[in-house]
Image (cartoon, rainbow, N blue to C red):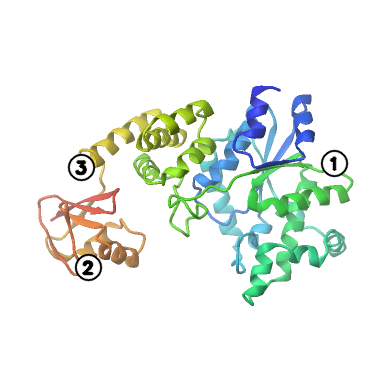
Amino acid sequence: MDSKIERLLHRGVVDVVIKENLEKKLLSGKKLRVKFGIDPTGSDLHLGHMVPLRKLAEFQRLGHQVVLLFGTFTGKIGDPTGKDKMRVPLTDEQVQENMKTFLNQAGKVLDIKNVEIVQNGDWLSKMTFPEVLELAGTFTASQMMQRDMFQKRLENQQDINLVEFFYPLMQGYDSVAIKADVEIGGTDQLFNLMAGRRIQEKFGMEPQDILTVPILEGTAGTEKMSKSLDNYIAVLETPREIFGKTMSIPDHLIWKYLELLTDVPRVDITHWITDKHPRDAKIKLAEELVILLHGSEAAKNAREEFHRMFTEKGVPDDMPERVLPIGDYQILDVVIATKLCDSNSDARRMINQGAVKWEDKKVSGIEDIVQVSSEEKVLQVGKRKFAKIKGE
């Protein structure tokens, strides 16, 4: 088998349904339509999103047609997968803005110019009620209720909206509308992906093959990477932030991150994991991730800055600057003014945890007084956030 096809089917893949079928299609030279569905419910991508996008890029490099399907209809309903409550619907304006942001970030790994971009609102919004009833007849209520997230809701006496039963039906019908040969998704999407096969068969089509990829754990090493859990590395973060956050991941994630997010050969990954210190392996990983998102020069600079900050105990060169009126301030007010924390409560938490330093001295509480003068002072929040404070 061609080495590129071998890699496509095995590296960073959990399962292929049906593997023999997909192998034959890939070896036949047929140009396949490879579907990846996105509900544009958020605007910022993180490394967890890069896992399926990188697999799509492999299909693209082999000459297949990648189809990015935006759920402009389903996104306003919300996929119940992994949710223990109903999602708040989005407006049309929010959906369109999130789409634009997604494409800008996906362009880090995909050749967007050669991606087919579709919106399921173009066909789902036009379905008649008889057509909806025909689609609903593909599944029984008991089959839908077998889904884990619905069982959990029942146990917790939480509502299940009947509209949510239609989500896998709509996602499956999307595969009919775009004539998908293959669909890619995370392991948590398997029910919805399999629904596509079933519904394509109902409409007299050859069922799509399915390729599932692993769920990437966040920087804490336990739960799925998620912005809400604050355990993510964002695509749009600075090289310094990406490098620093990568260096903070637990050792047991090094292999998985290298396997799923880089092109480092497996034999080299084995060498870095078994023959090198975990810190050296993380540096290699951090460099590769910065190269992926920002390029080689940025990776070189990020490594040098990390070494200076954490080995030589220095400070970064490109700190943001904040000018305040000369005077005495509570440290909480200064931290809030710099916007180094996401919220006022986050600023309080960081100070109370001893994670804030003024001129390299740890502050003890939110009411500590610091002096802002015409001389530049350095504020540090956590391990990687710095700001210059100057009075006038």
User: Which of the two residues, 359 or 276, is positioned nearer the viewer here?
Assistant: 276
Q: Nearer the viewer, mark 3 or mark 1?
A: 3
Image coordinates for residue 135, horizontal then vertical, percent: 84, 59
Residue shown at 70%/65% (left/top)? 164
Residue shown at 75%/36% (left/top)? 19
User: Which of the two residues, 264 or 63, is positioned nearer the viewer here?
Assistant: 264
Quadrant position of residue 149:
bottom right
Outermost residue toward the front?
274
Distance from label 3 to label 1 (Cα)?
61 Å
Q: Is residue 165 visible?
A: yes
Say left or right for 139 vs 265: right
Figure disc tally: 3
List the residue tagged with mark 2.
366
In the image, what residue type sits under mark 1?
A: Glu
List the residue tagged with mark 3.
313
Residue shown at 55%/53% (left/top)? 97
In the image, what residue type sits under mark 3?
A: Lys
> Looking at the picture, does residue 384 appear above or below residue 22?
below
Q: Earlier in the sequence, mark 1 or mark 2?
A: 1
Q: Residues within 10 Å of mark 3 (few under 14, many from 20)?
A: few
Say left or right for 129 vs 14: right
Q: Residues within 10 Å of mark 2 (few under 14, many from 20)?
A: some
